Amino acid sequence: MKSFEVNFDGLVGPTHNYGGLSYGNVASQSNSQQGSNPREAARQGLAKMKALADMGFKQGVLAPQERPDVAALRRLGFSGSDAEVVQRAAKEAMPLLVASCSASSMWVANAATVSPSADTADCRVHFTAANLNCKYHRSIEHPTTSRVLGAMFADQQHFAHHAALPAVAQFGDEGAANHTRFCRAYGEPGVEFFVFGRSAFDTRYPAPAKYPARQTLEASQAVARLHGLTDDGVVYAQQNPDVIDQGVFHNDVIAVGNGEVLFYHQDAFLDTERVLAELKNKLARRGGNFKAICVPRAQVSVEDAVRSYLFNSQLLSRDDGSMLLIVPEECRNNERVWAYLNSLTSQNGAISEVRVFDLKQSMQNGGGPACLRLRVALNETELAAVNPGVIMTAPLYDTLTQWVDRHYRDRLVESDLADPQLLVECRTALDELTRILKLGSVYPFQLNP
């Protein structure tokens, strides 16, 4: 039976704005308070989805969330009609309104951790929604994330869904941004690679000094248990605390893996030799031949990696066995990074081609190609069980592009978030979107009209 890696990209929401909410994310903070263009942001994301589908890759869409999150504001003591809640929050606590309007759910690499059926004890695909409790504006996402994923992967014969881990610091979980999987083929047992920034209980692991480490070892271990993974199919590694303090807030900012290949920066991990040896040995026992491509700091600094998002790229396998690297335009604009990539593709190695995409609207808020997608390995039967409404096709692309043009503003600044009409626009758009994607009722305003 054939198996595939399907990339489900987050559709940028109507309230896409530069609120500067993500401490430790250099791009998010450096572009704070600039005007955004939600329509352009959504179109850029859709263009990438369509291009990859046209290349023959399996591609899906993951819906955005309702924003502003009026229910979250009500839990914080704001009352009255929905319009009054928004206006009171704007007057009394604008930072809370900005947080409740964040379109950060577009970065669905943080939506969940996914283990394919070839790895799990019950031979189902397992999803655990990420609690994202390090940042308030993201911690409010997981209830809707769980409902959306449940509507996309509804067949309980093939899919298992787990609630987010307890929303406490000891179990900080950032989802697939700190998780990848190595395998000989997508339908064969693989080795799941969990990268953490700190341990909640074990003082032997050093912590960063400046920025928070968002993923804990204990959260990664809990997800592995929930998914029924075996010890010989899991490797844990700690991020280098020094690179976290340089803006590497997730592992997918400093490393990316696919198939049998890990593409990583020299300074990405602590105890790198042990980590690589464990990955190589465990994958070999599953029939795979692990390959590591190290980018030396002498050629690409951590600063260059963070500013260009070289590693926040998509590493995709072609049918002929070669690999394609999808990078943002910022990589081409960085002289050292672009020189490295040209050298890499000239070596006739695992990565044979680089494709560049304009994702400026997302990049300015701190998310590149890898942030925008959730990878799900599926066999033919499982793919057939996925809600067909979320699979990218040429007609769906046209429909979604027209939907964006009808409902999205072409400019948004912080003061616009106080406009109750923005909430009306968002709900109108999402109500139509659930019909387009055949999701049913997944948003709070649909569940509690």
Image (spheres, grey):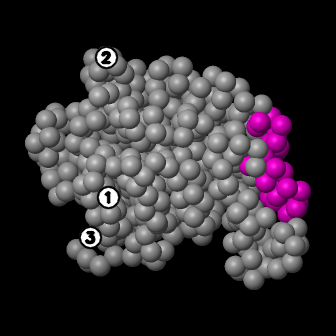
Measured in 3D between alpha carbons, the distance from the residue under mark 2 to the one under mark 3, in whole angstroms, is 41 Å
Task: Identify the residue under disc 1.
Answer: 227
State which region is magenta.
Answer: 403-430
Say which label, 3 or 1, has the lower sequence index: 3
Looking at the image, residue 320 sits to the left or right of residue 362; the answer is: left
Q: Looking at the image, is mark 2 or mark 3 earlier in the sequence?
A: 3
Residue at 46% x, 66% y is 164
Instruction: Indicate the quadrant where residue 357 lies.
Output: top right
Mark 1 / mark 2, whichever is N-terminal: 1
Q: Is residue 254 visible?
A: no
Predominant secondary structure in magenta? helix
Q: Is residue 154 above or below residue 92?
A: above
Q: Residue placed at 69% from the left, 72% from the top?
A: 72
Residue 440 in the image, given as x and y percentages of width and height: 66, 50
Q: Residue 33 — which label?
A: none
The residue positioned 47% from the left and 20% from the top of the image is 56
**Mark drawn on residue 205:** 3
The residue where tag 2 is placed is 320
